[in-house]
Amino acid sequence: MISRQNTQADVISTQPALIENGRAKVNLTLRVVGRRTDGYHEIESLVAFADCADRLTLMPGLPLHLNTVGPLAQSCGDAADNLVLKAARLLGERVPNLRFGEFTLDKVLPVAAGIGGGSADAAAALRLLARANSLPIDDPRVIEAAEMTGADVPVCLASCACVMTGIGETLMPVAVPNLPCVMVNPRVGVPTKDVFQELGLRNGELLVGAADVMIEAAEWPEGGTSIRDWLETLAIGRNDLEAPAVRVQPVVSEVLSSLRNADGAALARMSGSGATCFALFENGADALRASQKIQLDHPQWWVHAGTLS
């Protein structure tokens, strides 16, 4: 009889892969309060999450590495610059002997699209590493790594509807119902820095009218409120980055027009810094029909019909 000890490769091969989804983030409203003296912009945003997502897999125990697959893998750029690896390394700096692994990212969400795709992927990486290392997701070291990775990563870590304030670090959960929606991206990237540059705030400057906005902050409906009531409340809001994004990339205006002209659309707005825009509907059937027409009229656009919550 021949016997041998298990090698490290044998042990690793028997460990199951861990999987998390990086759900698209949608800014239902986005108010820019001003720009701090350190250059960061303060915002107030009601954020919800869509039922479309990237898929991130971790094979624990292997050396830290990232593979990209899926229909939009080529748009991810150099893997060394990916937020998944940045988040992992930041957590590793805070947790001694952190157990890493090999990530595989199935990329389906557009990049530089205002829906936090990269941030959602980074947040998924932190959740996976927390699971692989038996860390609670609210461990201060996990939270700090999220904040250091990017402004949208903390909200994507929980992937629950909330009001996000400050530079993205202060989160207050909100009970948002399932809102039928259509999301559209013209497959044109809009760099966030270009949009904020077009907004034109100097360090230490408030946006015109921001003081009134802070005084008259929106009161969101309580849990159990009807979709129609939510739509009426959301219609009062806005996205302060919409106008500068249109100046940076005029096709955003075309996307908004297509959504606003869709039958049954209650409101249409841009998410984040663009170029993804969304329309909300009272029912899913209207949303599906609208998405099919927009996709037929603009076959080159990325279109998704689903729900936000």
Image: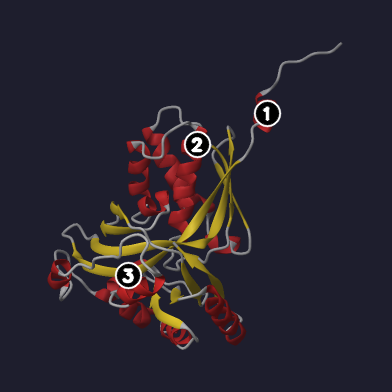
Which callout, 2 or 1, points to the residue nearer the camera? 2
- Mark identifier at residue 9: 1
Q: Amino acid at mark 2?
A: Arg
- Of 67 and 176, which appears nearest the observer? 176
Where is residue 89 shown, x and y percent of the image?
43, 40
Looking at marks 3 and 1 on the same chain, the residue that comes earlier in the sequence is marked by 1
Query: On the rendered image, what quadrant is the N terminus found in?
Result: top right
- Label 2 Cα neighbours within 10 Å, binned few <14 / some 14-19 / many ≥20: some
Does dot 3 land on a helix, a strand or a loop? strand
Q: Mark 2 sits on what residue?
A: 131
- Of 254 and 203, which appears nearest the observer? 254
Q: Mark 3 sits on what residue?
A: 29
In the image, farthest residue toward the right = 1
Horizontal arrangement in the rendering, residue 156 relative to residue 202 (left or right): right
Does dot 2 land on a helix, a strand or a loop? helix
Query: On the rendered image, what quadrant is the C terminus found in?
Result: bottom left
